[in-house]
Image (cartoon, grey):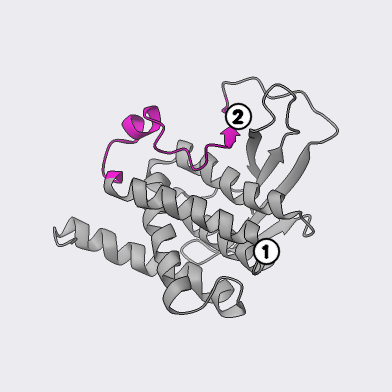
Amino acid sequence: MASFTITLHARTADEPEFQRVSVTAGGDEELPEYGQVWVWDILYAQQLFALGETQPAQELKETLELWAVNMSSKVFQPHGHILAKGYLDLSEDLKLVNGDEERPTAADGDREIIVTVTGQAGQLPDVAVSPEALEAEERKNLVLGLGQFFNFDNPMFARELPIHVLAMRKYHADIHEPHTREALDEAPFYAIQKAMEYFQAANQGTVQ
């Protein structure tokens, strides 16, 4: 089992517009690099389903899809370069507290969320979130915060994420809307399949 503790730090008086997020990996197993994007796809689908037909759900989709469109042309650039340029920042309103930064002092308004991942290697994992009852903004920042953590830490994830987000956008537009049970179950697998096809075509020099 792998787990990730996402801390949404209380907003500060000097920078109230920013949501600071810390992520700590735990559990008795390390999540393989290739599995991180699978976990994120499932988490994204879960939170869109939980948010339903609401403005926060639309805002989350728009934030990620705009980033993915802008980032999709840069997926084969060196990770260090796009990281330094700020291209891997998913949202202007979210700041990830990196490992070499001082973690904000614990405050009453902090919110701690645990994402637990179980399953067999090579198979789609089971992803559970605790607590289950979250505010809409917490769901948005959970998805963005864990995605930001993986984006900074894992070049493979950063390369694949834009393609996965755009594949899920296509699924939601053409097949089932994100608040449906079908999208919850099917959209992550669809994204994985489409990304696999994209990178296979790229390796063969046939990407349009």
Highlighted magenta segment, given as a residue range: 74-99
Question: If the image is split into quadrants, where does the C terminus sit?
Answer: bottom left
Determine the secondary structure under disc 2: loop
Q: How many marks?
A: 2
Please give the name of the residue rendered at 64% of the width and 48% of the height, measured from the top-left corner: 142
Q: Position of residue 44 (x, y in %)?
A: 57, 59
The secondary element bearing badge 1 is classed as helix
Going 63% across and 51% down the picture, which residue do you hit?
140
**Relative image position of residue 146 (x, y in whole percent):** 58, 45
Q: Residue at x 38, y 41 (%)?
A: 155
Give the number of the disc on residue 15.
none
Residue type at mark 1: give it: Leu
The mark nearer the N terminus, 1 or 2, is 1
Q: Which residue is mark 1?
A: 51
Camera-side residue of 104 and 23: 104
Q: Is residue 125 above or below residue 22?
A: below
The picture quadrant where one finds residue 203 is: bottom left
Q: Is residue 188 left or right of residue 68?
A: right
Residue 28 seen anywhere in this rendered image of the structure: no
Residue 158: give x, y in percent of width and height.
Answer: 40, 45
Task: Give the labeled residue for mark 2.
Answer: 97
